[in-house]
Image (tube, grey):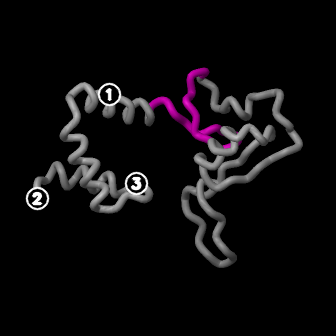
Amino acid sequence: MDTLISKLAECFEKLPGIGPRQARRFVYSLLQKDTSFIIEFSKLITDLKKNVIKCKNCNHYFQNSTQTNTCSICSDLKRDKTKLLIIEKNIDLENIEKAKSYNGFYFVLGGLIPSIGSKISKETK
């Protein structure tokens, strides 16, 4: 098998929910795209790593355009300071915010809290 195809497929497989077949589908799909798409795709991945950071207060990932270490949610003075919702992942925060039904603060664990006696992953805060 072609090494570049295999290596890129292995990278995709490291993403959650992506198996070997889906990873190869991504690679072959990218091969069918025009060069401008590939350049933009590569740039977005690079920019993501450069410009998105974790909030120092809640661990939510956000684009740091203000050069602060605090996300817009934690900086929002209109939020209810008496409420703190502890959630597993950033995607959970995004879904709750889309629903516009909660106006408190969050803390993103980065993973599930293990049962007593289990090891805690590096991502769990």
| Residue topped by disc 2 | 1
User: Within 10 angstroms of label 1, few (less than 14), some, or many (20 or more) residues?
Assistant: few
Give the residue type that dot 3 points to. Leu
- Disc 1 marks which residue? 40
> Helix, strand, or loop for circle 2?
loop
Of labels 1 and 3, earlier in sequence is 3
Question: Which circle's residue, 3 or 2, is located before the other in the chain?
Answer: 2
Identity of the amino acid at label 2? Met
Residue 33 placement, left or right of 98: left
- Tag 3 near tag 2, CB within 8 Å: no
Q: Secondary structure at mark 3?
A: loop
Residue extending farthest to the right is: 82
Residue 15 bears which disc, if any? 3
| Amino acid, disc 1 | Glu
Q: Which residue range is magenta in the image?
A: 50-66
> In this orientation, which residue lies closer to the viewer: 9 or 24?
24
Quadrant for residue 105, please give it: top right
Instruction: Give the image quarter of residue 35.
Output: top left
Q: Is residue 11 left or right of residue 60?
A: left
Residue 62 falls inside the magenta stretch: yes
